[in-house]
Image (cartoon, rainbow, N blue to C red):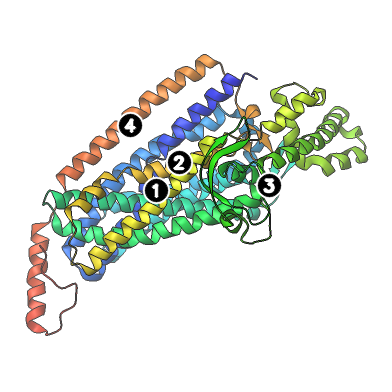
């Protein structure tokens, strides 16, 4: 198979996936923030919270529609560009995708309509329930997608059937509760909450700088900073959990992220900064923090984290073991029912490493004909690009900790300084609006690029997964996708900017009615609650 074909297929999928993920985190986070704001409206009856719900809900709706449009393409790509992958593991991968479409997406889409058109048709409480169902549906969509992706990172609950030549599900429970999938979901959802919090913070700061919609802006900052602080702390904690999971499910990815060439005595140090050299297999000018990686990766002071060189040697052994399984499989396929049980037992004993033997198909049609040099080359292929992973991970982590600092600052100012914010901090809040998206894209780069050379880790190499398309087909469709997605992105940005400039719609009659009722309550009672101040 042509390497150019596989690389172009990967580039096309990476482009569509990264475009799509520009919309997903904001959808996840804004859905929860809007639900929180409407809950406060139902509790207090204050019109300002209704205005906030409608305003941020409008921006959520724009983002939601564009996210759906860009996401549909990706599902078709599995069948068009990755047909052998779809054939080989479709029984497992297709199940969570189907559930996502039938349950989560339809629930989300249905209640989105009720959210926008049900304000005058539903009671306050019923409309609030609808808003929360929109938020739950949004997060359910992410859950099932990440269950599917988590299985690609850690393929549990399935086994290879030599009769059908496909992977088949053996335990739906194991697939759903895969530790990698669950860690990815909570980490990705929390990252989405941070993204929305920074977005709300930045837009609200812009309004304060322009001396517009100050009541909405200050309250939005209060909500976003409190929610964002909890989310930013969760991202760090849950990211640490993902690292711990990788230490026993994706050892090569973890070693590459840390540019750990040799196995260190436990506990291993964490390389804070350095310059990985993959050809020389060393990291120049490394600044290490003693014990840190051992504690993060193993939660102990005694367990080792294997280095890249040892993992390559292990991969070579697994390739040789996989060749035994491959040879038995080919004999079983040739003899069919006449194949002796001993041969089937041999295959079962070595089937765990069948995927490693398939790495050789990049170099030779029949892996059994591979030379020693090709076996060693295939083992070396299990090392992903170290330098890009090393730096992408560190930039992502640096941004993650910066969000904690930002949220703490605005939370303290909102809570203890009468919502007064220095102008420099408002400018900074506007400037950092793009940074959560950068962090999220870096996170996906680490997750997906770090899995190479596998489509399904340890099971199916990427080089075997692609469809047999021509380079011209891929180049034309890639150009088409780039053009179409760029147009959608411009539309998204134009609509967002338009409605942010327009600002919230203020129902003057409702506000005046609430103020009259509020004044009547004050005249009839000596008790004043913190929420009972006239609307601005």
Mark 4 is surrounded, within 10 Å at the Cα level, by few (under 14), some (14 to 19) or many (20 or more) other residues, namely some
Residues marked 2 and 1 touching at CB (< 8 Å): yes
Q: What whole-number distance in Å separates the C-alpha atoms at marks 1 and 3?
A: 29 Å
**Residue to which mark 4 is pinned:** 488
In front of the other: 137 or 117: 137
Quadrant assignment for the N terminus: top right
| Figure disc tally | 4
Please name which of the two marks, 1 or 4, marks the residue nearer to the observer: 1
Q: Is residue 161 visible?
A: no
Q: Is residue 321 left or right of residue 415?
A: right
**Residue to which mark 2 is pinned:** 442
**Residue to which mark 3 is pinned:** 263
Please name which of the two marks, 2 or 1, marks the residue nearer to the observer: 1
Quadrant assignment for the C terminus: bottom left
Choose the circle earlier in sequence order: 2 or 4.
2
Q: Image quarter for residue 342?
A: top right
- Residue that sits furthest to the top in the current view: 472
> Residue drawn 18% across and 67% down?
418
In front of the other: 41 or 433: 433
Choose the circle earlier in sequence order: 1 or 4.
1
Q: Position of residue 145 (x, y in %)?
A: 51, 45
In front of the other: 13 or 316: 316
- Residue that sits furthest to the bottom in the current view: 526
Mark 3 is surrounded, within 10 Å at the Cα level, by few (under 14), some (14 to 19) or many (20 or more) other residues, namely some
Q: Position of residue 51 (x, y in %)?
A: 19, 56
């Amino acid at each position: 198979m042509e390497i150019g074909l596989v690389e172009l297929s990967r580039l096309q999928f990476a482009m569509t996936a990264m475009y799509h993920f520009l919309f997903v985190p904001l959808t996840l986070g804004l859905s929860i923030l809007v639900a929180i704001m409407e809950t406060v409206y139902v509790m207090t009856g204050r019109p300002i919270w209704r205005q906030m719900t409608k305003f941020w809900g409008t921006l959520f709706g724009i983002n939601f529609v564009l996210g759906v449009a860009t996401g549909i393409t990706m599902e078709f790509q599995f069948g068009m560009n990755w047909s052998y992958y779809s054939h080989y593991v479709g029984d497992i991968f297709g199940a969570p995708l189907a559930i996502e479409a039938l349950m989560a997406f339809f629930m989300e889409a249905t209640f989105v309509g009720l959210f926008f058109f049900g304000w005058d048709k539903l009671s306050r409480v019923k409309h609030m329930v609808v808003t929360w169902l929109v938020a739950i549906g949004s997060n359910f969509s992410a859950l099932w997608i990440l269950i599917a992706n988590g299985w690609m990172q850690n393929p549990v609950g399935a086994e290879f059937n030599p009769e059908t030549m496909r992977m088949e599900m053996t335990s739906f429970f194991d697939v759903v509760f895969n530790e990698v999938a669950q860690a990815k979901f909570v980490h990705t959802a929390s990252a989405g909450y941070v993204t929305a919090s920074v977005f709300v913070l930045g837009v609200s700061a812009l309004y304060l700088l322009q001396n517009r919609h100050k009541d909405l802006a200050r309250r939005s900052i209060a909500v976003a900073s409190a929610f964002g602080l909890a989310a930013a702390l969760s991202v760090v904690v849950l990211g640490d959990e993902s690292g711990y999971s990788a230490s026993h499910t994706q050892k090569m990815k973890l070693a590459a992220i840390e540019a750990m060439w040799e196995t260190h005595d436990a506990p291993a140090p964490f390389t804070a900064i350095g310059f990985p050299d993959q050809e020389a297999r060393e990291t120049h000018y490394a600044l290490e923090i003693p014990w840190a990686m051992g504690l993060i990766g193993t939660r102990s002071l005694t367990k080792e984290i294997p280095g890249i060189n040892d993992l390559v040697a292990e991969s070579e052994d697994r390739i040789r073991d996989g060749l035994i399984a491959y040879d038995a499989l080919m004999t079983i396929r040739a003899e069919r029912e006449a194949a002796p049980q001993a041969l089937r037992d041999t295959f079962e004993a070595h089937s765990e490493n069948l995927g490693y033997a398939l790495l050789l198909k990049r170099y030779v049609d029949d892996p059994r004909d591979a030379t020693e040099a090709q076996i060693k080359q295939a083992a070396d292929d299990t090392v992903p690009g170290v330098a890009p992973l090393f730096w992408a991970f560190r930039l992502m982590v640096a941004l993650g900790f910066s969000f904690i600092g930002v949220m703490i600052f605005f939370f303290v100012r909102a809570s203890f300084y009468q919502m007064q914010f220095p102008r420099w901090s408002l400018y900074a809040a506007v400037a950092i609006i793009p940074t959560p998206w950068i962090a999220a894209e870096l996170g996906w780069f680490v997750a997906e690029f770090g899995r190479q050379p596998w489509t399904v880790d340890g099971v199916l190499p990427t080089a075997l997964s692609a469809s047999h398309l021509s380079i011209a087909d891929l180049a034309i469709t890639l150009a088409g996708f780039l053009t179409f997605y760029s147009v959608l992105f411009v539309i998204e940005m134009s609509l967002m900017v338009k409605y942010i400039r327009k600002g919230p719609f203020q129902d003057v009659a409702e506000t005046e009615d609430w103020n009259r009722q509020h004044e009547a309550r004050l005249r009839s009672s000596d008790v004043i609650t913190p929420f009972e101040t006239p609307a601005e």
